[in-house]
Image (tube, rainbow, N blue to C red):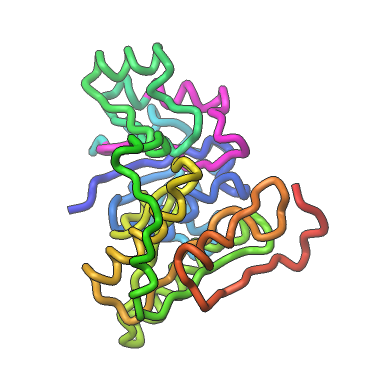
């Protein structure tokens, strides 16, 4: 059974910063999303704000309002935002405290780790809740160097890359994955970001929580394990950041370290500038 969760976006659901929430409410094999917490869209359903999202997911102003109106306390509260620099907005602290005070464990994909905050740690401990920072780097003893094993993978591989950041690479991966499966093509996706982990894909790693020396090896390991364990007809690799935005260059790692020959390249034609 999936764990239940509510998602905090607190005013950012309709923005690009809410892309973690967008992915989760479009679909997750790991969590059953019960509600979104966003004071700007109270009374609406998620599908009215996020295209392609379920219209059965209600939006509440706060954790307190959700708990007052719904009989079941969720297992987790997930921060549904991905912000530049990965810093925690001050306005989110109150809702995080509210979740922990009610014994709801909190999951964050921010670079600023919630477990480093003494007040939040104390609240979690007192109420038997957990703080789970999924972007905490793993110990280097658990990481891998590239060794060439990926050169023996003959399964077709396609990387979904973008001209800029936040262009829908992961969402396109999911759409392609679902369409392939519907047409009898056994397909797996390699997740490379926090939202992919939250959505419950089997194979992958969080690239920007990985020291640079190990990125190529972790890409290779994820592809090789996917091929050996799941035996797919097609492997999709979720790209990160951007091929051209100088603030977030990324892409050659997938092509070279993953020995990927096929690319879906995404471009947003109405954008005039890199931010």
List the single residue furthest toward the bottom: 183
Rendering coords of residue 53 (x, y %):
46, 60
Q: Is residue 213 above or below residue 235?
A: above
Rendering coords of residue 219 (x, y %):
41, 58
Numbered marks: total? 0
The region drawn magenta spans 74-98
> Is 125 contained in the magenta span?
no
Asked whether 271 or 257 is in front, the reply is: 257
Q: Residue at x 43, y 47 (%)?
A: 214
> Is 86 contained in the magenta span?
yes
Q: Residue at x 39, y 62 (%)?
A: 190
Q: Residue at x 41, y 41 (%)?
A: 7
Q: Evaluate whether residue 83 shows in this view.
A: yes
Asked whether 119 or 38 is in front, the reply is: 119
Rendering coords of residue 121 (x, y %):
34, 17
Q: Is residue 253 above or below residue 255?
A: above
Q: Is residue 169 above or below residue 32?
A: below
List the single residue furthest toward the left: 1
Q: Evaluate whether residue 77 shows in this view.
A: no
Q: Residue at x 43, y 17 (%)?
A: 117
Query: Which of the 4 quarters of the picture holds residue 178?
Result: bottom left
Q: Is residue 33 above or below residue 118?
A: below
List the single residue furthest toward the front: 147
Rendering coords of residue 257 (x, y %):
47, 62
């Amino acid at each position: 059974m999936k764990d239940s969760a509510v998602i905090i976006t607190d005013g950012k659901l309709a923005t690009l910063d809410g892309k973690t929430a967008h992915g989760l409410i479009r679909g997750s094999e790991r969590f059953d999303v019960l509600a979104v917490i966003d004071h700007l869209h109270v009374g609406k359903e998620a599908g009215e704000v996020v295209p392609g999202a379920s219209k059965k997911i209600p939006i509440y102003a706060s954790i307190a309002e959700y708990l007052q109106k719904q009989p079941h306390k969720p297992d987790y509260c997930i921060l549904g935002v991905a912000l530049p620099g990965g810093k925690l907005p001050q306005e989110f602290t109150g809702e995080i405290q509210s979740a922990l005070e009610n014994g709801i464990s909190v999951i964050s994909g921010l670079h600023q780790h919630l477990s480093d905050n003494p007040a939040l740690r104390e609240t979690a401990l007192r109420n038997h809740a957990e703080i789970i920072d999924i972007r905490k780097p793993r110990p280097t003893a658990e990481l891998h160097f590239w060794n060439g094993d990926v050169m023996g993978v003959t399964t077709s591989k396609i990387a979904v890359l973008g001209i800029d950041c936040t262009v829908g690479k992961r969402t396109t991966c999911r759409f392609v994955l679902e369409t392939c499966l519907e047409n009898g093509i056994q397909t797996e996706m390699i997740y490379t970001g926090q939202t992919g982990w939250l959505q419950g894909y089997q194979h992958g790693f969080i690239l920007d929580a990985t020291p640079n020396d190990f990125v190529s090896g972790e890409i290779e390991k994820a592809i090789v394990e996917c091929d050996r364990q799941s035996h797919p007809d097609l492997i999709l690799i979720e790209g990160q950041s951007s091929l051209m935005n100088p603030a977030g260059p990324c892409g050659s790692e997938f092509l070279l370290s993953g020995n990927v020959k096929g690319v879906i390249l995404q471009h947003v034609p109405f954008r005039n500038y890199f931010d």
